[in-house]
Amino acid sequence: MSVTPPGPIGDPVFGNGRQYADDPFSFMRACADSYGDVVRFDLGPRETFLLTNPADVERVLVADAERYRKPQFGDDAMDTLLGDGLLMSEGETWQRQRKLANPSFHNRRIGALAGTMVDHTESQLGDWSDGDVVDIQLEVARLTVKIIVSAMFGADITDEEVKTVQEKLEPLGARFEPDPRRFLIPSWVPTRENREFDAAIDTLESVIDGIVERRQGTERDPSVDPAGPEGVAVRGPAGDGDGDLPMDLLSVLLRARERGEQTDENLRDELVTMLLAGHDTTALALTYTFYLLSNHPEARERVAEEAAAATADGPPTAADARDMDFTERVLNESMRLYPPVYTVFREPKIDVKVGGYRIPEGSALMLSQWVVHRSPRWYDDPETFDPSRWEPQRRSQRPRFAYFPFGGGPRHCIGKAFSLLEAKLILAKVCSQYDLEYEGPDLSLRGSLTMHPNHPVPMRIRER
C-alpha cells in the first residue's frame, strides 16, 4: 500500500484540533484545497483522514460498506445520548432495529401522513401576523417536533414540552461542538458542561416518558381510536407481520417489546434518536431554504407560484408535493450549500486502501458534505445559489456522490422521503401565504452534530 497522505502539521497533544475547533468549515475546505482528495490530520489523539472525492465517498458508504463502522471517539457522550438507536448501533442490533423501523417509513404510509404535516403547519401559521418578526429557526423546529411526534409516536406533544425540548437542545448541542481539550477530561468529571449535558438528557427522557405514558393510556381507553391522531392509522405494507395494527414507530416498538424483542433501553434509544434526528435536520434545511429565498426574490416567486398551485383546491397533498419540481430543486440547492449534516464519520475495521493511500484500522474517516458540495471540481461557481443545477441534464453530468445530504448505502437516512415531503408541504403552506424577509446579520455557522446558524435567524412576515 502507498505512503501516508499529505496534510497540515498539528500542535503537540492537540494535533489540528484547535484549528478544526476554531472553524471546522474553513479548516476542511483549506485542507481539501491544499492537499487533494485524501488529507491526513490529527484531531487530538485520533488520526483522521478527510475524503473529498465522490468516488471514494461512494466506495466507503456503498461498495465497501461492510469494511467500515461508526467510529468510537473515546467519549461516551454520544452513547449516553443516543445509545443503540439507529444512528449509532452496529451489526445485528442495527439490522434488527432498521427492519423494525422500515414499515413506519414505507412510502405508502409517508404519503398518507401529508394531512398530519399540513394540519400542524396550518395551526402554527395561525399564530403569525403580517409584519411580525420571528426567529425562523425556532419556528420551524417547533413545527417539526410536533410533526415527528404525531407521525412517529402516534401522540401529541404539548407546547410546554416542545419548549422544554428546544431549551435542552442548546446544552446537548454544545457538548458536541469541536473542542480539542475535551478528550483530556472524562465525561464523568462534573464540569459545568457535563452537568448541563446530563441534566438535559434526563429532562429529554422525562418528556419522552410522558409521551409514551399518554400513548399507552390512550390505547387502554376503549373510547379512543388506538391508531392515534390522523396519519398514524395507516397500515403497514403487506407481509410486515402486523396486519391492520397501527404502524407509527412507537406502536411498532411497543409490540416488539411485548414479544420480548425490545428492552426498555432499546425503546428509549430509538425514541430519543427519532425525536432529535427526526426534527432537527428538516428544520435546518427549511431555515437555510427560507434564508436563501429571502436573498433571491426570483426563486422565491417561482416557489410561491408552485405553492399557490398546490394549495389552490385545498390543503396540499403528497400528490401536489410531487408536482413541485422547482421547489424540490430549491431544496436540493439549499442542502448543497448548507447541508444540515456537514460531515459523516466512518472507521475502518481493517487496514484499507483509499485514493491510493493506506488508511489504518481504527482511524477516523471524514466524508464531508460541506467540502464536496462546494467543490469547483463538481459545481460551476459553487458558492452561487443556482437551483437550475438540479435540472435532470445538468444533474446527470456530476458523479453520484457529489451530493449526499442524506448519506448513502445501507445506512442512508431512513427518513429521507419523510423529510422531503414534510419540507415541501411546509413550503407550500408558508409560501402560498407569506413572503419572509431576512433581517439578520451575515449568516455565520457553528458545527455540532449538525450545522446550525451561530445566531438567531430573524424573518419579517409579509402577507402576499
Image (cartoon, grey):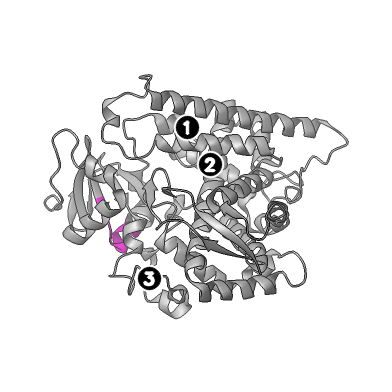
User: Relative to 302, is 90 on the left or the right?
Assistant: left
* Disc 3 to disc 2: CB gap under 8 Å: no
Amino acid type, mark 2: Leu
Quadrant of the drawing holding the C terminus? bottom right
Q: Which residue has dot 3 on it?
A: 384
Q: Residue furthest right?
A: 223
* Residue 406 pos. (x, y %): 46, 55
Do we see residue 89 in this rendering? no
- Nearer-N-terminus badge (3/2): 2
Above or below, comparing residue 412 to residue 258 in the picture: below
Q: Which is closer to the viewer, label 3 or label 2?
A: 3
Amino acid type, mark 1: Leu
| Mark 2 → mark 1, Cα distance in angstroms | 10 Å
Q: Residues within 10 Å of mark 1 (few under 14, many from 20)?
A: many
User: Relative to 34, is 171 on the left or the right?
Assistant: right
- The magenta-colored residue range is 50-58
* Residue 267 pos. (x, y %): 59, 32
Residue at the (34%, 30%) spot, across then down: 75
Q: Residue furthest bottom?
A: 393
82, 243: nearer the viewer:
82
Q: Which mark is residue 211?
A: none
* Residue 114 pos. (x, y %): 69, 58
418, 185: nearer the viewer:
185
